[in-house]
Amino acid sequence: MSTTGTEPVITTYAQAPARTLRVGTDTFAYRELGPTGGVPVVFFVHLAATLDNWDPRIVDAIAAHRHVIAFDQLGVGASSGKVRDTLEEAADDAYAFIRALGHDTVDIFSFSMGGMIAQDLVLKHPDLVRRLVLTGTGPRGGKDMDKVVRTTYWDVARATLTRSDPKEFLFFPRDAEGKRAGKAFVARLKERTSDRDQDVTLAAFRTQLRAIVKFGRSAPSDLSAITQPTLIANGDNDRMVPSVLSQDLHRRIKGSELIIYPRSGHGAIFQYWEQFAPVAAAFLADPPAGAAS
């Protein structure tokens, strides 16, 4: 994407061009937008998600001033290969992708499983990451994280019975406000009408679930090694990755900032996007403007 001459800078995720990058024998699908130059913000997506699962209201707020890169993990969407058996391997793939793009420093925005992968990446390659956003996620070895399988299948079944998108059940509370927020979120995800990804296959979905369970049952990582400025956010009733794990991250990552939104669950940052998007954009501003709760 050129930002020189008469070509406009694309700052709307729905219009971000679909690109591919060959890395060894693998091909990564990705989209980029926002002004080029400087340190990019790389988005790490959640379980069963493709490039089409990012809330454009959050992406666009950050891309207004920053170079944003979102990518499909291997075995997902338009990327080649198979989903990795562990999140450590997924972190290795992300590192290879970022370095192949020519970047030696990035900021990271992550959600849910993406935040778990991001933690593994920053711990293994601390010099790569400058600033870190961890939302709806938890630490390796986090208490009750391995229960995500039961919760996920139960909510998928409920969504099927009501002909709804599973994210309406998995991400949002089932009160009136949560139902409205869930439907609005799903509608925003449909704003892009061209170059959309294929849905994740059932086999890929199950492999990702098993990888999360392994992550949850593993020995904890030493998160005191994360010294980068870190912003953590979640809802106060996350049924997928328990909210207490966001508080655990906050305690273990020195100097981190924590936002817990009321009457919300796993998708709190999407339910409260009007409040969260400017906070995230400020935290990731270059130079940083700081975050506020």
Image: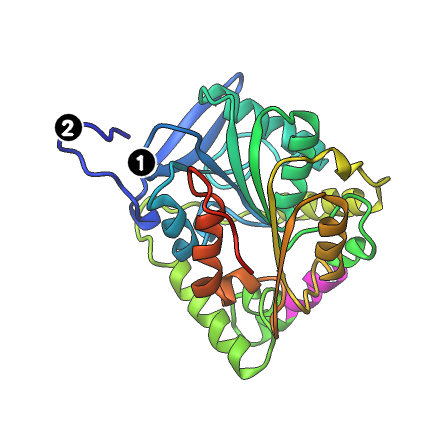
Residue type pointed to by label 2: Gly
Secondary element under disc 1, as helix, strand or loop, is loop
Of 141 and 244, the residue lying toward us = 244
Task: State the separation of the CA atoms marked 2 and 1.
Answer: 13 Å
User: Which residue appears at 56% of the width and 37% of the height?
Assistant: 131
| Residue 287 found in image quarter | top left
Residue at the extreme left: 6
Is 175 on the left or on the right of 13, as rendered? Answer: right
Is 20 on the left or on the right of 100, as rendered? Answer: left
Q: Which residues are magenta?
A: 149-157
Name the residue that disc number 2 marks. Answer: 5
Residue at the extreme bottom: 176
Colour mapping: rainbow
Name the residue that disc number 1 marks. Answer: 35
The answer to if 153 sits in the magenta stretch is: yes
The answer to if 35 sits in the magenta stretch is: no
Residue 213 vs 273, above or below: the answer is above
Q: Position of residue 17 (x, y in %)?
A: 31, 38
Residue type pointed to by label 1: Pro
Q: Position of residue 260 (x, y in %)?
A: 63, 64
Q: Earlier in the sequence, mark 2 or mark 1?
A: 2
Of 83 and 225, the residue lying toward us = 225
